[in-house]
Image: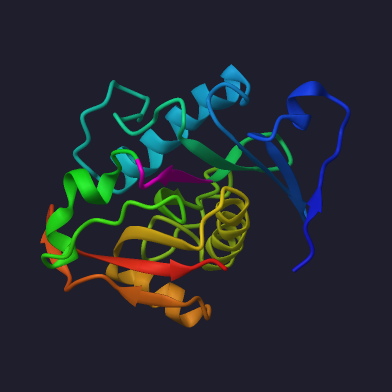
Amino acid sequence: MQIVVNHNANKKEQDPRFMFFRRGGVRFIFGDRETLKPAIVSNLGHYRYKVFVERLKWHLPCEEGREFDQFDRSDTMHLIALGDREEIVGCARLLPTTRPYLLESVFPALLNGQPAPSSPQVWELSRFAAVDFSQDRRSVMKQFSVREAVELMRISMVCAKYCGARKLVTVSPMGVERLLAWAGFSWVRAGRPLEFGGELVVAGYIDVA
C-alpha cells in the first residue's frame, strides 16, 4: 500500500500530533482537537451523529445533530477521511488505554473477567465508520462499505503505530469481526460476544506491529 505523507511547511502540519495522507482520491487527516481545524471537528460531530444515531439507531447521550462523548478529550486522536469536496466519508477514533476508554468504562463485560488493558502500546479503536453520504452506498452493515472500510482500517493501523501502539483493542459488531478476518487482519477475541442494545458485539485485539 502506498501512502503519501504531506510535508507542507505549514506549522500545523509539522506538529507531531497532526498527519496528512492521500490515498487515491481520498485525503486522510489525523490529529487531536487542538491541531484539527474547528470546522473539521464540527463536521466530524455531525457526521458521527448521522452514522451512529440516525443510521445505526444507537442510543447515545449527545446533543441534537452532533455526536461526541466523554472520551473525546484533548488527548483523543481522530482519523478523518475527506472526499473530493472536503466532505467527511469516514472516521475513526484512537484512545490511549492508559486513560479511561470505551471498552474499560462501558463494556468491561466483554473482557470475560480479564483486566482491561492499560498500556502505552495498546490503543482503543472506536467510532469507526466509512459511509459516503453523497453517494449513499449502504452495505448490509450500514456502518461502512467494504473497500473503504478496509482502507480506513489500514490507515488507522498506520496512525496507531505512529502513536506507539503495537495492538488495537476494539468493541465491534459481529459483522466487523467477519470483515477483519476476510481482509486478513490479525484479530483475536478478548471474550465471548454479548448482546447490547439488541445487537451482538464482541471485543478483540488487532495486531499493529
Say which residue appears at 18% left-offset and 45% top-offset: 106
Quarter of the N terminus within the rendering: bottom right
Image height of 33 relative to 86, above or below: above
> Residue 88, percent across and down?
58, 38
In-image side of 92 versus 197 (left or right): right
In-image side of 82 versus 198 (left or right): right
Image height of 37 relative to 14, above or below: above
Judge by depth and name the residue closer to the eye, 3 or 84: 3
Quarter of the C terminus within the rendering: bottom right
Can residue 96 be found in the magenta stretch? yes
Q: Main secondary structure of the magenta part?
A: strand
Location of residue 36 by image quarter: top right
> Residue 57, percent across and down?
24, 44
Residue 119 visible, this angle: yes
> Residue 92, percent across and down?
48, 47
Can residue 58 be found in the magenta stretch? no
Say which residue appears at 37% left-offset and 34% top-offset: 49
In-image side of 153 versus 62 (left or right): right
Q: Point out the stretch of residues depicted in magenta.
A: 91-98
Q: How is the image coloured?
A: rainbow
